[in-house]
Amino acid sequence: MEECFNFDKNDVPDIKNIIRNISLVLVNSHYTIGYIKPELPNVVNIAGLHQPSLEPLREEMKTFIDGAKHGIIYFSMGSIIEPSDFIELGNTFIQELKNFPQRVVMKWNPELLNEIPDNILVEKWISQTQVLDHPNCRLFITHGGFHSTLESINASVPLLGIPMFTDQYYNMAAAEHFGIGRMIPFKEVSVRLSAEIKEILNNPEYKENIMKRSQLFRDRLVEPLDEAMYWVRHILKHKTSTHLKPAAVHLTWYEFYAVDVLLILLAVILLTLLAMKLLVVWILRSFHSKFKKLYTRVNHKPQRKDYKDD
């Protein structure tokens, strides 16, 4: 905070005031890859904003992909996971993928692999969107990162996810839910990899589902960048965002959750129950008193004497 906004240490605003003063929230999300939820007017979904403009593939890679008669399988575990930490994983993939008729483009460190078959091209860094957007790309084996999932949907390429941490499990669970991919737990890769690849490649439903999902993702009134810029300019132009924010941001927690109203209702209920209890006690006591008097009269009534003639 101090470095970004040049605040003096003593002038840093309270976090509650910062939350109340948020004018606009740009969210890297979209309803086609998540679950439907209500959102406020000042929350704008801009998933796809990061999509770069496509440049031509390198000549060597272009030739390799263009010549794939059965298509290609693209493999990448993102930019955070270090291949040196998963050396065995890379060699496992090589052993499994070398037997497929498809060619494989693999983002990995080639120096860590025991062998590189002719049908596999391995490079340390690959422009992912260029490969995914190629018409020969038939499957994306991924760690399930959010941007990778977005790019795969945008390019209509089915997913095979091997999630490692954080949101990757959620993203791959969503992919399975929408029928656009499959998920393999990391510990089961060596056992299930080949079967899962064959399932996705041979079952046309995955391709059909992700093509439909891609159409929904792309079908927007404006591009994500244009929408983000519009709302930023909108706030700057009008110098306010009160028309976009709910009154709830200015409420205390007990007002927001209506605790004061609930306490009044609880008090009314308790008083009603207490009044009912007192009424029942009074009625029972009244009946008890009357019954007691009646009992006393009956038991103390003088007995009539019978006189006999002598």
Image (tube, rainbow, N blue to C red):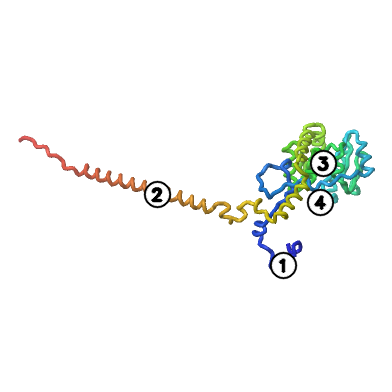
> At x 72% / y 54%, what residue is drawn?
237
Helix, strand, or loop for circle 2? helix
First along the sequence among labels 3 and 4: 4
Q: Amino acid at mark 4?
A: Ile
> At x 66% / y 46%, what residue is drawn?
39
First along the sequence among labels 2 and 3: 3
Instruction: Please provide percent x and percent y for residue 88.
Output: 84, 46
Q: Amino acid at mark 1?
A: Asp
> At x 75% / y 42%, what residue is drawn?
221
Q: Give the number of the mark in front: 4 or 1.
A: 1
Mark 3 lies on residue: 141
**Of residues 223 and 146, the one drawn nearer to the viewer in this rendering:** 223
Q: Amino acid at mark 3?
A: Ile
- Residue 38 as seen in the image, left or right of residue 163: left
Instruction: Please provide percent x and percent y for residue 253.
Output: 58, 55
Mark 1 lies on residue: 8
Q: Give the number of the mark in front: 2 or 3.
A: 2
User: How far is mark 2 from mark 1, CA to CA?
Assistant: 60 Å
Q: Count residues near mark 3 (Cα–Cα under 10 Å), then give few for <14, some for 14-19, many for 20+.
A: many
Q: Count residues near mark 4 (Cα–Cα under 10 Å), then give few for <14, some for 14-19, many for 20+.
A: few
Mark 2 lies on residue: 275
User: How far is mark 2 from mark 4, CA to CA?
Assistant: 67 Å
Helix, strand, or loop for circle 1? loop
Helix, strand, or loop for circle 4? loop
CB of mark 2 within 8 Å of CB of mark 1?
no
Image mark for residue 80: 4
Q: Give the number of the mark in front: 2 or 4.
A: 2
Question: Is residue 99 in view from this perspective?
Answer: no
First along the sequence among labels 2 and 1: 1
Q: Count residues near mark 1 (Cα–Cα under 10 Å), then give few for <14, some for 14-19, many for 20+.
A: few
